[in-house]
Image (cartoon, rainbow, N blue to C red):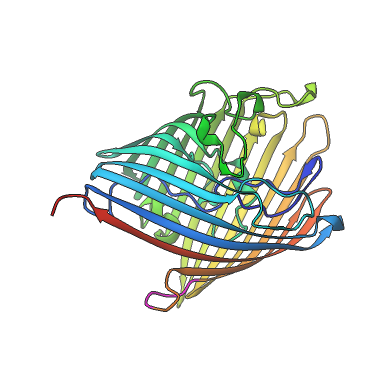
Amino acid sequence: MRRLAVACTGAVLLGFPIGAAAENRVPFLVEACTAPCAGYEVSAELQNDWVFAADPSFLKSDELGPTITVDLFLAPTDNFRFDASIITEEVVEPEAGENAVFQGIGTYLAELYTTVNAGPATIRAGKFDTIFSLASEVAPGINATELVSDIDADERLGAEVLLDFGGLGMEQALAATAFTTDRSVLSDSLFTRRGRTRLSDGGAGNTDGLSSFSIALDGCRGSEPIDCYLEGDFGYRLGIRYQAAGAQSGEDPEDSPGDELAYLAAATTSLELDDMTLRLLGETAYLRHFDGGSDDALLLTGSAALELQPVTYVASYTQQLNLVAGEPDTREHLADFEAIYEPGEGTSFEGWEFAAAYTVARDADETAHIFSVRAVFNFDGDVELAPQ
């Protein structure tokens, strides 16, 4: 979990989501190798976040840490496979204003599920990140998704059906998911313990049984929906999610839990400008009883990425309006400006990615100016298991 800004006692400037990298949609077929086969993808990241200016000033800090993601799959047939995602990163945040170097690092199993492809339908079951915010999946950058990803429902246990079809001159995909919060031993972590999730922790979706569900409709012109941001001409997502309220997490009767009902609409488009590509993304989400609490939330997110190979320049902005019950509303802001350098194929730095970001995070009481740098190395491989 990548911590962008620091939390002070009783108030958090930004939450830290599980799984900062954009998640992949359900893998439909084995494309990298001929089944039966197995494979892996590894992303090794080193990131430094320097809060060089803040109000109040004690929020200033410097934090250096790794994120290592190992994705594994085993495909006995072309239409059946097992997937796992193991993440090593910071799982316990340092105190507000505290410098940290490789502290609070733990390893946990983020996803473990099986996928079956049956014609136009794909079914997966197990532990996985549910589909909701498009911006948190595809928006590029180190810190661009730090605020909007708080609305995702990650590390859930459940089942999902994804149906592909065509209509209105576009490729369409409809995903329906039933889930609950993972409270198994898999919710804890090794080395540094983040603690096993309990029913008493409360929160939206943290209930017995598959009491929560979501439905997401994706459409794309010019590409499959899964690749629409990078390869499509225009795409959209419409989503609705219901998460049953968990136990009351505090003693304040005014903070009584409520069932979360969330609505989302997002769109992307790409424009070719001579040797450049401009990718635009916009998203709005309204959450009634956000995270199972008494307050509502409205999030607006916009992103513009100008791709001028081998560098991509990104500007992103997210505003979260907190509709507080019985009190004045509050706002949180995240503005992010980045440059991402990805060397081309055949160069000595193939497989690497380097990025630098300037981020401003602000709420009613706190402001943080953050300079971040990140280096990522990606590699993968597979092996065919059939006898030669």
The residue depicted at 79 percent of the width and 21 percent of the height is 253
| Residue 283 seen in the current view | yes
The residue depicted at 72 percent of the width and 50 percent of the height is 94
The x, y position of residue 165, in whole percent, is 32, 42
Q: Is residue 343 magenta?
A: yes
Residue 48, by quadrant, is: bottom right
Asked if residue 140 lies left or right of residue 161, the reply is: right
Q: Nearer the viewer, residue 91 or 303?
A: 91
Q: Is residue 284 above or below residue 180?
A: below
Q: Residue furthest front?
A: 191
Q: Nearer the viewer, residue 385 or 145?
A: 385
Asked if residue 361 lies left or right of residue 346, the reply is: right
On the rendered image, what quadrant is the C terminus found in?
bottom left
Residue 65, by quadrant, is: bottom right
Number of numbered markers: 0
Q: Is residue 61 above or below residue 179?
A: below
Q: How would you classify the magenta stretch by its main secondary structure?
A: loop
The residue depicted at 75 percent of the width and 48 percent of the height is 13
Q: Nearer the viewer, residue 88 or 364?
A: 88
Asked if residue 315 lies left or right of residue 169, the reply is: right
Q: Nearer the viewer, residue 72 or 299?
A: 72
The x, y position of residue 372, in whole percent, is 66, 65
Q: Is residue 292 above or below residue 1?
A: above
| Residue 32 seen in the current view | no
The x, y position of residue 353, in whole percent, is 50, 68
Q: Is residue 318 magenta?
A: no
The x, y position of residue 250, in whole percent, is 75, 26
Q: Which residues are magenta?
A: 342-346
